[in-house]
Image: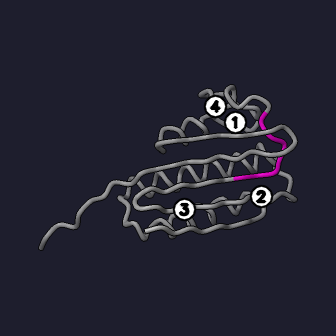
Amino acid sequence: MKNEMQLQFSALSQNESFARVAVAAFVAQLDPTLDEITEIKTVVSEAVTNAIIHGYENQEDGMIYLCVKIDGNVVEMEIRDQGVGIPNVEEAKQPLFTTKPELERSGMGFTIMENFTDEMIVESKPKEGTVVRLRKQLSKTEAPCN
């Protein structure tokens, strides 16, 4: 089974929960485990929050683009912004690294995304934006016989 959805929404903090719920509802057709759906919602939340806080620096004029594809039991998610970009992606991916310590950010967003998915690719160009691609293979569990 192949399926795809795309969303575009304003880079506002209140839309982070919308993105989480939308992706969870779309992925629900695969009947994921509770742990899998929690991990998917968490990585979407982290990526969208990064775009809002770091990509657009909490300015209200940006847009976030979200695309989710399902192919069999594989979920591919792409979260894209056209914000300030990341000057050094490898540095930004280091645990506890943050450019916003005054906001008491933990600097664990990329680490969480990497740990909860099978693959994470981050592409970014200063002044052009960032694309985060996440891939997660879901377990195929058979329904028990009654």
User: Which of the 4 image quarters holds residue 106?
Assistant: top right
Q: Position of residue 4 (x, y in %)?
A: 56, 67
79 is higher (above) or lower (below) than 125: below
Contact between marks 4 and 3 (CB within 8 A): the answer is no
Instruction: Tell me the distance, in whole angstroms, between the alpha carbons under discs 4 and 3.
Output: 24 Å
Query: Which mark's residue is nearer the viewer, 4 or 3?
Result: 3
Residue placed under numbered mark 3 in the picture: 69
Residue placed under numbered mark 2 in the picture: 11
Q: Residue furthest bottom?
A: 146
**In front of the other: 113 or 5:** 5
User: Which of the 4 image quarters holds residue 14?
Assistant: bottom right
Query: Which mark's residue is nearer the viewer, 1 or 2?
Result: 2
Figure disc tally: 4
Q: Which residue is rendered at x = 75% and y = 51% of the image?
A: 52
Q: Position of residue 138 (x, y in %)?
A: 39, 54
Mark 1 vs mark 2: which is more N-terminal? 2
Assign a secondary structure to mark 3: strand
Q: Residues within 10 Å of mark 3 (few under 14, many from 20)?
A: some
Instruction: Tell me the distance, in whole angstroms, between the alpha carbons under discs 1 and 2.
Output: 20 Å
Residue placed under numbered mark 1 in the picture: 104
Q: Where is the N terminus found, in terms of image quarters?
A: bottom left
Instruction: Tell me the distance, in whole angstroms, between the alpha carbons under discs 4 and 1.
Output: 17 Å
Assign a secondary structure to mark 4: loop
92 is higher (above) or lower (below) than 136: above
Q: Residues within 10 Å of mark 2 (few under 14, many from 20)?
A: many
Q: Which residues are magenta?
A: 80-86
Assign a secondary structure to mark 2: loop
Q: Residues within 10 Å of mark 4 (few under 14, many from 20)?
A: some
Q: Is residue 116 magenta?
A: no
Contact between marks 4 and 1 (CB within 8 A): the answer is no
